Amino acid sequence: MRLILYLVIKPFYTARHHIFEIYHRSIITKKIKQLLKKFIPNFIFNHFHKKKLDYLAKFPESFSIETVNICNAKCWFCPQPDHTRTKGYMHFDIYKKIIDEIHPYRNHVKSIALFMDGDPTLHKELISFLIYAKKKKIKHIYMSSNMEFFNEKLINAIFENNLQGTLQYVIASLDGISETTHQSNRIGVDTKKAYDNTNLLLNIRKKNLSFYPWVFPRMLINETNQHEEEDFYLYWKNKADKVLRTKMHNWGGQIDNSKIHESKEIFSSVCLFPFNQCFIQIDGKVRICCLDVNGKNIYGNLNDSSIKEIWANSDFQALRENFLMKNINKLPTICQDCTYPRKGQWTLPFFWEKEI
């Protein structure tokens, strides 16, 4: 019976990706939005804009929870290997506090990343973290991993504990098809293990007749791997749920490398991170952005405040105001030179926004 239901629902499950694409990416949709903005009186537009900002100010719509700030990779395009903070793991009590505070707002929160400056699969309590989130009816969790340690034991534990609904998707960071290209980017990562584990996750999911977690192999395009972009897409297109080929950025001015294919339009749009996403380090400190690997801009601490209190404090309010007013010289240094694509997310999952 479960197999029949799976086969009946599968086409609709696949179709929703295409429907989403057509609606959010079509030129018709863009033209309609432009026309509406052109003909709707400013006072009406401003009213709904303010309403949205007030809604977001109540509680973060997205979270990045740094379960671990240790990584097995030493990628040349990432400042993580050289960050100056104490390396370690998030304790369960801090994680529990975060989830407990999210619980009353679980219908408001659209995404929760269990990673920031490290690979989440290195945390021995990762499954316990997911189990607790499931207990509190928290969904929309996702992870990004270089996949070397996303192994059979971890995958089986996800399905044995029925966590595939809690863990909505996994981004598999694989930056090349050949071993030479992949290892020149994901330095220190075993290419065969990374690919085998990604395929294993897809195969075990299929064996369990499950739609989740979605699997998104992702390539960060740069001068060293662009020649393999098409092969990467063709390899994964009929296996994974979506293949991401993403522009790189300068990590808020922390990376300056000619091999990066980044946008040169610094501060071309308002960054959405301060308005909708809360970034929590392993020690419970809340910083302004995922790119701030050294935690130089700390705006709160969950050890002595709640998420809601921190989100509404004067530091965050001033940051948002400076972004809205484009007071660039009043922003933190990391914001002034940032080329992060599309400046974060608003309501859509970022993987839709960043595909090229």
Image (cartoon, rainbow, N blue to C red):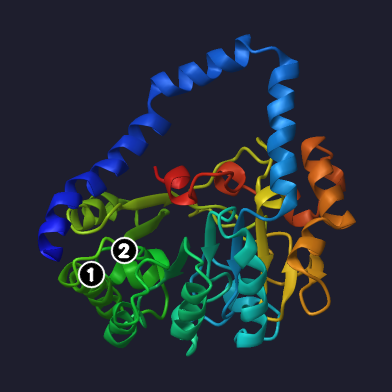
At label 1, counting other C-alpha atoms closer than 10 Å, the crowd grade (few under 14, some 14-19, many 20 or more) is: many
Residue 315 in the image: x percent, y percent?
86, 56
Residue 185 in the image: x percent, y percent?
41, 68
Residue plotted at (84% across, 49% down): 317
SS at circle 1 = helix
> In which quarter of the view is residue 155 placed?
bottom left
Which one is in front, 167 or 69? 167
Q: Which residue is mark 1?
A: 205
C-beta proximity under 8 Å, tags 2 and 1: yes
From this view, report whether residue 116 is shown above or below residue 192. above
Relative side of 88 to 321, left or right: left
Relative side of 210 to 352, left or right: left
Relative side of 134 to 13, left or right: right
Q: Which residue is mark 2?
A: 212
Residue plotted at (15% across, 57% down): 5
Amino acid type at image mark 1: Arg
SS at circle 2 = loop
